[in-house]
Image (cartoon, rainbow, N blue to C red):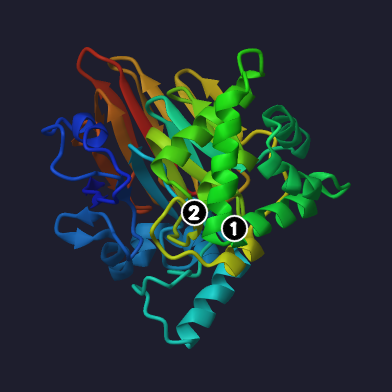
């Protein structure tokens, strides 16, 4: 096992304080710090010493991944582990299925679109299901809300600018109704879009939500925040269709292929299949491909994206329906620990306190890379305080 140094991503929506404070660095940082990547994605690999983890694996994939993982996933690490720190909303986005990603990647390669071109949709041939576990209170828009709830919100707003569109949702096929409304909104000329957004804002100001359900109050509060931050943006309208979620530290959500979402604020550990494929639909200055986003989006309503955990003795294991990754969160009292079984590659990430991983000392924001060939290791909380540690590996 060896110390794994993450790749820092400095996207504009990142926080100047959250990652810096976690890592014990000067705060606020000089520029926004959005994500720490602990993985082997070629766009931003973590490093072992001075060598990228992708190159470490390529030099000896048998040693790094083991025969079982190589047999199922090839010669690449199947997952990408991150710490995400958002001070402002990320784009409204969705991710493709494995088949969509493979076809899109090959088509864009055949068209000669460079991997770093701003109009490129598919950076790799992989899908990107993702699990997010909050480290701080975390706010998100995740999955399309049930149609009956959205219609109740529209009725409460009683907004003429919305009423002309709500008829699209009065259909027996909720999926097709949501597809029609989202496609219409994302295709509106800017002048019409601003007219609808400002109409809704006016109704939010005029209507009383004092006795409305909590979810409805949260939805309009988030809409108003986005309208101030992104005036006239189509993502502001899209927010009216999405579940608003608040996670407490330790709580999690899971999003499969095609699920529209936008993370709004907070810090979390995120694990996903080893991909950087993002189709955007608003709240961004980056490339937006409307037809492709609509094509890959899953318009089935998602009642609740939260995922429970099976807890036993300080271990919180999150059950997700993919084989690319498995994540367990450990809350360790001083001196307590757990064994790392290394039949495949693993990453151990510390987010609180201090822990020993074999001979390595891990502090918040640091991680250990454990190749498949390593003997079993033990992770133990060190010192007089509790430690929080995440153990990432492939589902076996």
In percent of the image, x 51 and y 41: which residue is there? 131
* Dot 2: element: strand
Mark on residue 238?
A: none
* Quadrant of the image occupied by residue 359: top left
- Asked if marks 2 and 1 touch (Cβ < 8 Å), the reply is yes
Whole-percent x, y for residue 169 in the image:
79, 46
- For marks 2 and 1, give the CA distance: 8 Å
User: Residue 79: where, in percent of width, then height?
Assistant: 44, 53
Label 1: state its secondary structure. helix
Find residue 222 and report its horizontal and vertical position in percent.
50, 32
Task: Give the side of residue 106 with respect to residue 360, left or right.
Answer: right
Q: Residue at x 20, y 54 (%)?
A: 48
Considering every residue shown, the one lying at the far right of the view is 172
Does any portion of residue 210 appear in the rendered image?
yes
Question: Which residue corresponds to the image point at 79% horizontal and 50% vertical from the top-left?
Answer: 168
Q: Which mark is residue 282?
A: 2
Camera-nearest residue between 302 and 162: 162
Would you place residue 192 above or below residue 212 in this image? below
What residue is pinned by disc 1?
186
């Amino acid at each position: 096992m060896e110390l794994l140094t993450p790749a820092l991503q400095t996207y504009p929506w990142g926080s100047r304080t959250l990652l810096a404070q976690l890592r014990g660095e000067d705060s606020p940082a000089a520029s926004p710090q959005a994500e720490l990547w602990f993985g082997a994605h070629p766009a931003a690999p973590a490093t072992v010493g001075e060598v990228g983890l992708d190159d470490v694996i390529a030099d000896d994939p048998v040693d790094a991944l083991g025969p079982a993982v190589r047999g199922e996933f090839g010669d690449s690490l199947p997952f990408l582990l991150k710490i995400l720190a958002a001070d402002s909303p990320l784009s409204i986005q969705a991710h493709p299925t494995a088949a969509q990603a493979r076809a899109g990647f090959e088509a864009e390669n055949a068209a000669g679109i460079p991997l770093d071109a701003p109009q490129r949709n598919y950076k790799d041939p992989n899908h990107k299901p993702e699990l997010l576990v909050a480290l701080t209170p975390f706010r998100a828009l995740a999955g399309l809300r049930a149609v009956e709830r959205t219609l109740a919100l529209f009725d409460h707003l009683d907004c003429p600018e919305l009423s002309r569109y709500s008829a699209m949702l009065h259909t027996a096929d909720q999926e097709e109704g949501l597809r029609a409304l989202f496609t219409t909104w994302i295709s509106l000329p800017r002048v019409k879009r601003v007219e609808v957004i400002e109409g809704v804002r006016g109704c939010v100001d005029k209507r009383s939500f004092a006795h409305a359900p909590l979810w409805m109050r949260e939805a309009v509060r988030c809409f108003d925040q986005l309208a101030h931050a992104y005036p006239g943006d189509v993502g502001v309208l899209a927010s009216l269709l999405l579940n608003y979620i608040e996670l407490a530290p330790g709580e999690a959500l899971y999003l499969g292929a095609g699920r529209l979402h936008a993370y709004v604020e907070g810090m979390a550990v995120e694990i996903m299949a080893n991909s950087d494929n993002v189709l955007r639909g608003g709240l961004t200055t980056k490339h937006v491909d409307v037809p492709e986003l609509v094509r890959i989006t899953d318009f089935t309503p998602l009642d609740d994206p939260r995922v429970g955990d099976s807890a036993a003795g300080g271990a919180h294991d999150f059950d997700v329906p993919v084989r690319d990754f498995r994540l367990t969160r450990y809350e360790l009292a001083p001196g307590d620990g757990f064994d790392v079984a290394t039949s495949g590659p693993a990453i151990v990430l510390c987010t609180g306190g201090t822990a020993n991983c074999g001979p390595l000392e891990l502090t918040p924001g640091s991680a250990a890379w454990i190749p498949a060939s390593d003997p079993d290791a033990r992770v133990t909380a060190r010192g007089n305080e509790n430690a929080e540690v995440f153990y990432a590996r492939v589902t076996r």
